[in-house]
Amino acid sequence: MGLALDEARRAVGTGDVPVGAVVLDRAGRVVGVGRNEREATGDPTAHAEVLALRAAARHTGEWRLEGCTLVVTLEPCAMCAGALLLSRVTRLVLGAWDPKAGATGSVWDLVRDRRALHEVEVVGGVREAECGALLREFFEARRA
């Protein structure tokens, strides 16, 4: 989660919401990193999770990321939860829950829906206070 938090902090420099993500392979090696880049690139799909999954697929040469773990500072939205399912990631480790748009256990639970073609193990609340504080500080500064 420390690496994902580092990525989240880098996102602030481009005016993006501070969300960072890291993909680990079965052995725990980093195979992909990402941070929100919607503001930086003008791409509405440039969420940290999607960028980390893309990087992992490039690194491994395979779109199926079975056995991999996605670590992200904020609970994924519906788009990112869908990307998790489609990439066959085995485990999701998340920091802060998202009570407004979370799709892996808060508002929706797409990754554990019985109709989904793949199931993702979800481990939530890892360094939750730190991840949540980073987001609160970002938005408080925007409102000031």
Image (cartoon, helix red, strand yellow):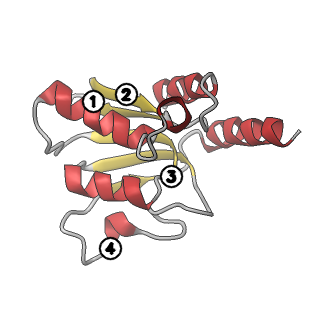
Which one is in front in this view, the residue at disc 1 or the one at disc 3? 1
Which amino acid, mark 4? Asp
Would residue 63 be found to the left or right of residue 18 on screen? left
Tell me how far mark 3 sits from mark 4, CA to CA.
16 Å
Residue 60 position, x and y percent, is 14, 29
Q: CA distance from mark 1 to mark 2?
A: 7 Å
Task: Give the quarter of the image for residue 101.
Answer: bottom right
Quarter where residue 81 is shown: bottom left
Residue that numbered label 4 is attached to: 113
Residue 90 position within the rendered picture, expressed as x and y whole percent measured from the top left? 24, 50
- As drawn, the label of residue 55 is 1
Q: Earlier in the sequence, mark 2 or mark 3?
A: 2
Q: Secondary structure at mark 2?
A: strand
- Identify the disc placed on residue 33: 2
What crowding class fits label 3: few (fewer than 14 Cα within 10 Å), some (14-19), or many (20 or more)? many
Tell me the mark number nearer the camera, choosing from 4 and 2: 2
How packed is label 2: few (under 14 Cα within 10 Å), some, or many (20 or more)? many
The numbered dot on residue 44 is: none
